[in-house]
Image (cartoon, helix red, strand yellow):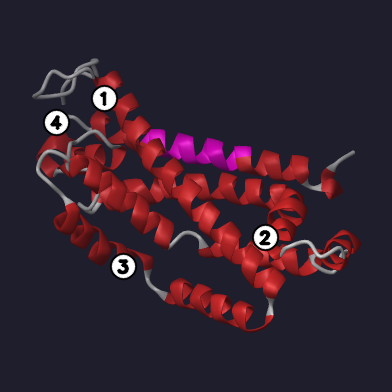
Amino acid sequence: MGPPDGCRPRTGNDNLAYWLYGCRISLLIAASATLVASVVGVVVGLLAGFLGGMVDKILSFFIDVFLTVPFLLAALTLAPILNERFALYDSYPTIQKTSLIIVLSIFGWMGTARLIRGEVLALREREFVQAARVMGMPTSRILFKELLPNLAAPIIISVSLMLPSFVALEAGLAYLGIGVTDGVSWGQTILQAATPTYFREYPQFLWQPLLGIVALVLSLNLLGDAIRDALDPKTRR
């Protein structure tokens, strides 16, 4: 086993810089997917909860359909298709990142949509919403000016819990070979370090990204719990 110095084996790259850059890529993909999935989930939840009727039934049906799709199977199928369909040689790493963001977003908005729908169902009978309807406000104004500000707490909680899950999913997908292939993400680092020969000689280079993922996901989950407790009126003193 080689000494745990600051250089990557066989390449001489700075290990700390490599590790930090892998964290940057993972967070970039996870944060972008969280933003897209949250926007889609909030819009769908607002429309389903406020409009009700046939619109609610149709949107709820789509939510249930997407929830029944096996994420891993869909990701293994969809991401390579997007990569090969839209990738050019010079922009292939960018297309791979974009494909991961699209895949994570497509299968990550349903929980937020269900949460927002439930909150809107409770809020739409409140006096301020009924007053806005009586005053003849357009639906878009009621949704985004009256209801949306009252949904800040569940949206923030949903985002804080979605982000760490996307970090872990990105690393897992990269390990399976459908992530970025330029070798800088944590998942790709794990894939390279998990080969038998590499692991026997340099096991520390497998534990470093693994511990980084565990620490990052744990810290983001703790942050989400703290935000939830701070925004929950029942826990305030």
Earlier in the chain: of badge 1 and badge 3, it is 1
Q: Which SS class for mark 4?
A: helix
Q: Amino acid at mark 1?
A: Tyr
> Where is residue 188 drawn, in percent x and y?
23, 41
Q: Which SS class for mark 3?
A: helix
Q: Which SS class for mark 2?
A: helix
Cβ atoms at labels 2 and 3 below 8 Å apart:
no
Span of residues in magenta: 211-223
Cα distance, mark 3 to mark 4? Answer: 36 Å
Q: Amino acid at mark 4?
A: Glu
Earlier in the chain: of badge 1 and badge 2, it is 1
Q: Is residue 194 visible?
A: no
Cα distance, mark 4 to mark 1? Answer: 19 Å
**Closer mark to the observer between disc 3 and disc 4:** 3
Quick check: 19 above or below 110?
above
Mark 3: few/some/many CA within 10 Å (<14, 14-19, 20+) = few
Mark 2: few/some/many CA within 10 Å (<14, 14-19, 20+) = few
Earlier in the chain: of badge 4 and badge 1, it is 1
Q: Amino acid at mark 3?
A: Ala
Does 221 appear in magenta?
Answer: yes
Determine which quarter of the picture holds residue 199. top left
Does 192 appear in magenta?
Answer: no
| Residue on which the image places disc 1 | 18
